[in-house]
Image: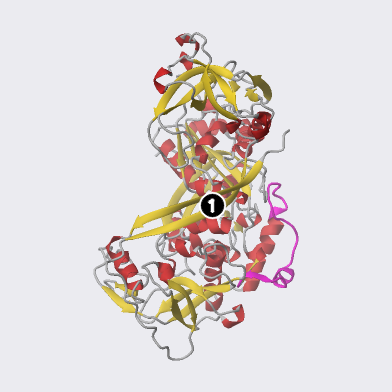
């Protein structure tokens, strides 16, 4: 089978609000430039482009088509789109390279989460007959999951606060992070709940942002990058959309994707956990070793651009390999309510 | 750098969906103030009903009545209700396992305060006065201590509920790009500006933010005349919501003199049958006191009477 590696990664600053359009062009043009400069590629070298974004988030139809302007798509390019996080766009790009359709491919994701009321927009990803008509609040659904784990003693409010403490401390070395700093669990636990039992620190901020990852096959990857991050496992799985029919304190789809991608032997894991308790849940589901460093970028709690944050996790994991900070790294992405869908990408140095 | 223009944008539409055999029975029962679950092959009862068996994946065959009371498995609190939610005062969200069910349903609980919510609390549905076969026939659940008196069944509807319509309304702050903003601000002055790509030299109108050939921002403003050539057109015969002009009329791609991309506008002031490729046209502006930051400042285009542009002058646009 063709060996495929991540050879480049860039992300836009994670910010609460940008003045730009919802088609992402303003965020994408600079990071395409960065990733092409990193790799020495030109736009003409990219054999396949794939994006992840959402028209519900953008509040307009075909926002991803306008985003294609940032590619410079004339003469025509081979291009595709998923209405999902860019991590799933990367999966499609990976398949494209595996099948020999392209030797270099670029995946990107973008989201201007600030354009609408994110907690209402996300209701539209729910069952349209039984749930969406109630307009359930996305943070409230995560809170239902958090309380189940608290009641069962699987995690504690202090353990959740410590996740936030670690995330913000790690994010101090990530110049693109939205939230970073030094706080203590005691300080955080003294603050009020916003969606009982969740406090503000338990929830990822609302973030505008974009991310881009370039992959290449075999020798082409070695030409483009001194230390490519070789993809050794790339898997995604999904759980039932019926919230009350599955055990929300487990994530069978994460466990299955992790086992298939051989997640249990990594040095670092970048987890797309938009809520503190979800990071604790994912560590168990993926059976990560205690020695694994978790989300050295700060993770989604330090900045969660919708439709880009999962792809950015894979990018940050790959960067750990490319900079020789890790030998084996995992990038994870999630989609849907309460960790319904999970994707795992395991990368290694050679 | 122009500060980008932005404005509130409301998007609303109805989703109309067919329910299928299982949810149709579930919704029809709600209209009679009854709650149904599906009987799975392993003996479990799923509420709301599963359309396909969670174990064997066969289509669900048997539905059984459950509840109406149930037990809260987990809850959270909505201190500030959002548009469209079941209650307009602070309320709880809960996963509720109805008596006789093995799975839980999500709904609101009207407990008055978070201190009156707890895992394990007993709740009962509060029904709509006029249930019509939708999930919101259950307005919410409410705390129920001890034995519960069943609310009287409703007569239901004469026929089964087979469709539901869900209205969606979303609010955004829509932003134009910096380049689009310059274009819209110039229109307010009665001018049309495009922008030139610094790499390939092509002039785009409206300015696009990034050149689709080179993927770089377009930077240099170019003022364009308000006359040009019809490159292609269609005759609109179909009425639609929001239509400003009575059909038949012509929507055309117009290549302004000096531009490298056509833009769309109306051609009025002649019979639709007289419009042709290559026809020379000019803008008919609304009175200046009506101008805003909008393309509608130009009411339409009309023929100039000049000789048609030669085909070769616009062929590359087609």
Secondary structure beneath disc 1?
Answer: strand
Q: Residue at the location (58% across, 82% down)?
A: B116
Q: Quadrant of residue A10?
A: top right
| Chain of the residue under the numbered disc 1 shown in the image | A
Most distant residue in the bottom direction: B146
Indicate the position of residue A43 as horizontal and vertical percent values: 55, 28
| Viewer-proximal residue among A285 and B293 | B293
Q: Which residue is mark 1?
A: A330
Q: Is residue A132 left or right of residue A228?
A: left
> Camera-side residue: A294 or B284?
B284
In-image side of B214 versus B241 (left or right): right
Q: Quadrant of the N terminus of chain A?
A: top left
Q: Residues within 10 Å of mark 1 (few under 14, many from 20)?
A: many
- The type of colouring in the image is secondary structure
> Against A308, is A265 above or below?
below
| Magenta segment includes A195 | yes
For the residue pair A293 and B92, the one nearer the viewer reads as B92
Figure disc tally: 1
Q: Say if A185 sits above or below B217 in the image.
A: below
**In this view, A232 is above or below A123:** above
Q: Nearer the viewer, residue B72 or B146?
A: B146
Magenta: main secondary structure:
loop
Residue B166 is at least partly visible in this image: yes
Residue B225 location, quadrant: top right
Quadrant of residue B68 within the rendered picture:
bottom left
Residue B274 magenta: no
Q: Give the residue at x 59% y 72%.
A: B89
Residue A180 percent coordinates (x, y)? 72, 56
| Whole-percent x, y for residue B16 in the image | 38, 55
Q: Magenta part of the protein: which range?
A: A171-196
């Amino acid at each position: 089978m063709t060996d495929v590696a991540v050879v480049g990664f860039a992300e836009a600053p994670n910010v609460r609000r940008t003045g730009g359009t919802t088609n992402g062009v303003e965020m994408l043009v600079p990071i395409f430039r960065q990733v092409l400069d990193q790799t020495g590629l030109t736009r003409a070298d990219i054999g396949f482009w794939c994006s992840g974004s959402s028209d519900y988030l953008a509040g307009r139809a075909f926002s991803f088509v306008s985003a294609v302007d940032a590619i410079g798509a004339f003469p025509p390019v081979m291009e595709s789109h998923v209405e999902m996080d860019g991590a799933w766009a990367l999966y499609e790009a990976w398949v494209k390279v595996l099948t020999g359709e392209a030797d270099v491919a670029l995946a990107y994701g973008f989201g201007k989460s600030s354009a609408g009321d994110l907690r209402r927009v996300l209701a539209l990803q729910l069952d349209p007959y039984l749930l969406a008509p109630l307009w359930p609040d996305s943070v409230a659904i995560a809170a239902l999951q958090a309380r189940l784990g608290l009641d069962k003693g699987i995690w504690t409010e202090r353990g959740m606060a410590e996740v936030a403490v670690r995330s913000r401390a790690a994010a101090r070395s990530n110049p693109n992070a939205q939230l970073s700093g030094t706080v203590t669990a005691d300080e955080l636990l003294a603050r009020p709940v916003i969606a009982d039992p969740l406090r503000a620190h338990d929830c990822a901020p609302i973030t505008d942002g974009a991310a881009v990852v370039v992959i290449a096959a075999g020798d082409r990857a070695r030409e483009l990058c001194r230390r490519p991050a070789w993809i050794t496992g790339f898997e995604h799985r999904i759980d039932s959309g019926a919230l009350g029919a599955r055990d929300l304190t487990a994530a069978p789809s994460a466990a299955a994707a992790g086992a298939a991608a051989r997640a249990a032997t990594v040095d670092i894991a970048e987890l797309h956990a938009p809520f503190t308790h979800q990071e604790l849940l994912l560590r168990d589901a993926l059976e990560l070793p205690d020695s694994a460093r978790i989300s050295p970028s700060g993770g989604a709690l330090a900045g969660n651009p919708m439709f880009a944050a999962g792809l950015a996790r894979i990018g940050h994991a790959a960067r750990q390999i490319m900079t020789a900070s890790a030998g084996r790294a995992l990038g994870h992405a999630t989609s849907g309510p309460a960790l319904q869908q999970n994707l795992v990408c395991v990368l290694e140095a050679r | 750098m122009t500060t980008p223009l932005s404005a509130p944008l409301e998007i609303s539409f109805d989703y109309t969906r067919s329910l299928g055999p299982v949810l149709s029975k579930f919704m029809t029962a709600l209209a009679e103030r009854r709650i149904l679950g599906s009987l799975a092959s392993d003996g479990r009862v799923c509420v709301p009903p599963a359309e396909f068996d969670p174990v064997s994946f066969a289509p669900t065959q048997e539905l059984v009545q459950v509840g109406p009371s149930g037990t809260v498995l987990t809850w959270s609190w909505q201190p500030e209700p959002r548009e469209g939610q079941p209650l307009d005062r602070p309320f709880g969200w809960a996963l509720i396992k109805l008596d006789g069910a093995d799975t839980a349903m999500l709904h609101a609980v009207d407990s008055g305060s978070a201190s009156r919510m707890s895992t394990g609390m007993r709740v009962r549905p509060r029904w709509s006065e006029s249930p019509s076969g939708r999930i919101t026939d259950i307005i919410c659940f409410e705390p129920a201590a001890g034995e519960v008196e069943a609310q009287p069944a409703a007569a239901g509807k004469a026929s089964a509920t087979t469709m539901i319509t869900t209205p969606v309304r979303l609010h955004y702050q829509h932003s134009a790009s910096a380049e689009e903003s310059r274009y819209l601000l110039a229109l307010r002055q009665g001018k049309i500006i495009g922008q030139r790509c610094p790499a390939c030299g092509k002039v785009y109108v409206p300015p696009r933010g990034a050149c689709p050939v080179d993927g770089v921002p377009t930077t240099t403003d170019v003022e364009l005349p308000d006359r040009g050539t019809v490159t292609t057109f269609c005759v609109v015969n179909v009425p639609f919501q929001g239509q400003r002009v009575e059909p038949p009329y012509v929507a055309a791609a117009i290549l302004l003199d000096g531009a490298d991309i056509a833009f769309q506008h109306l051609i009025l002031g002649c019979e639709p049958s007289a419009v042709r490729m290559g026809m020379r046209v000019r803008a008919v502006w609304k009175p200046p006191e009506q101008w805003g930051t909008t393309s509608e400042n130009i009411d339409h285009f009309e023929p100039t009477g000049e000789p048609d542009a030669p085909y070769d002058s616009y062929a590359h646009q087609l």
